[in-house]
Image (spheres, rainbow, N blue to C red):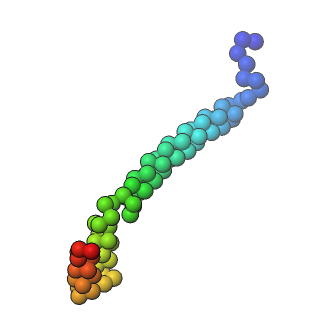
Amino acid sequence: MMWSNNGMGWGGWIMMTVGMLGFWALVVVAVLALIRGGRLNQSGPSAGSGYDDPLRVLDERFARGEIDLEDYQARRALLRKPR
């Protein structure tokens, strides 16, 4: 006997192939999650200069409609005041 399957038939080969494809799919998903997670962490509050972050948050809150125009203008003036 030159070639032996060690008792494994076609079903075993198919399961091995599916398992290998599943493993590599998990590796790719994990790498993509790490890459995307790194981008999200970089764009967080700690990535800014410190001065622009409160203004950006204020602009976003105004854009979402959480605060009205008068409140927005008053807060923006306070944030732009030199300390």
Q: Position of residue 28 (x, y in %)?
A: 50, 42
Which residue shows up at 33% across the image and 64% down it?
50
Which residue shows up at 32% across the image and 71% down it?
54
Residue at the top extreme, as displayed = 2
Relative depth, front residue between 72 and 3? 72
Q: Position of residue 64 (x, y in %)?
A: 31, 77
Q: Position of residue 65 (x, y in %)?
A: 30, 81
Relative depth, front residue between 20 and 74? 74
Residue 72 placement: quadrant: bottom left
Residue 47 placement: quadrant: bottom left
Q: Is residue 51 visible?
A: yes
Asked if 79 appears above or below 36 in the picture, the reply is below
Q: Is residue 63 visible?
A: no
- Quarter that holds the C terminus: bottom left
Horizontal relation, residue 68 to residue 24: left or right = left
Which residue shows up at 55% across the image and 44% down it?
26
Which residue shows up at 62% across the image and 39% down it?
19
Horizontal relation, residue 14 to residue 73: left or right = right
Horizontal relation, residue 19 to residue 45: left or right = right
Residue at the front extreme, as displayed = 83
Relative depth, front residue between 56 and 17? 56
How many labels sit on residues?
Answer: 0
Horizontal relation, residue 30 to residue 7: left or right = left
- Quarter that holds the N terminus: top right
